[in-house]
Amino acid sequence: MAVHILTIPFDPEHQCFPDDDLRHFLANKRVRSMRPAFFQQDGHPYWTILIEYEPLLSEEEQRPHEPDLPEDRQHLLARLREWRKEQAERDGVPVFLIATRERGPLLKRVNQELERQRVLFRIAHDRRYLSVAQYEHIAKALDEAGRMTGGWLKDTHEKARPSV
């Protein structure tokens, strides 16, 4: 099990703690526990989270397979990887979700993790670790991620069905 500490500064313009860094970090991880702590430094509020996690993908799945390709094909592979990176950044998803054949099992795990995150953040809100505005912001982001994941799952299942 690995540990990561993430510190998020308060965004006075939006009156919340932006969770983009947290969502990005959690994109391919299974959270075992999260311990939030709030503090102020020089009058600025921060939210620090100690995250105990495990990767969703095994080391073998994370390790890119490097095929033996001729030099001209290596150039094409590099262009494909760059395209996947651009698509992932544009869509706000991890690179491994772009142009992969086996999205179904991964998306099911992502969906389960989103549900787990909903429960954890609800508990954090109930215990007053999060304000109503913070909880609403997180809940909207989790709902959006859930809709996106559900759409990808539906798309994956439709593509897997044989045409009649």
Image (cartoon, rainbow, N blue to C red):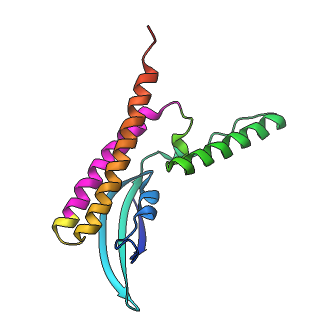
| Magenta-drawn stretch, dominant element (helix, strand or loop) | helix
Residue 26 vs 47, above or below: the answer is above
- Count of labels in the image: 0
Would residue 108 be counted in the magenta stretch?
yes
Q: Position of residue 74 (x, y in %)?
A: 77, 39
Q: Position of residue 136 (x, y in %)?
A: 27, 61
Name the outermost residue toward the right.
71
Residue 60 vs 34, above or below: the answer is above
105 on left or right of 94: left
Q: Position of residue 115 (x, y in %)?
A: 27, 48
Identify the magenta region: 101-123
Q: Quadrant of residue 5?
A: bottom left
Would residue 5 be counted in the magenta stretch?
no
Residue 138 vs 56, above or below: the answer is below
Q: Residue at 21% across / 60% down in the picture?
A: 122
Q: Residue at 39% across / 41% down in the picture?
A: 149
Q: Quadrant of residue 41?
A: bottom left
> What quarter of the picture does the N terminus occupy?
bottom left
> What quarter of the picture does the C terminus occupy?
top left
Report whether residue 26 is seen: yes
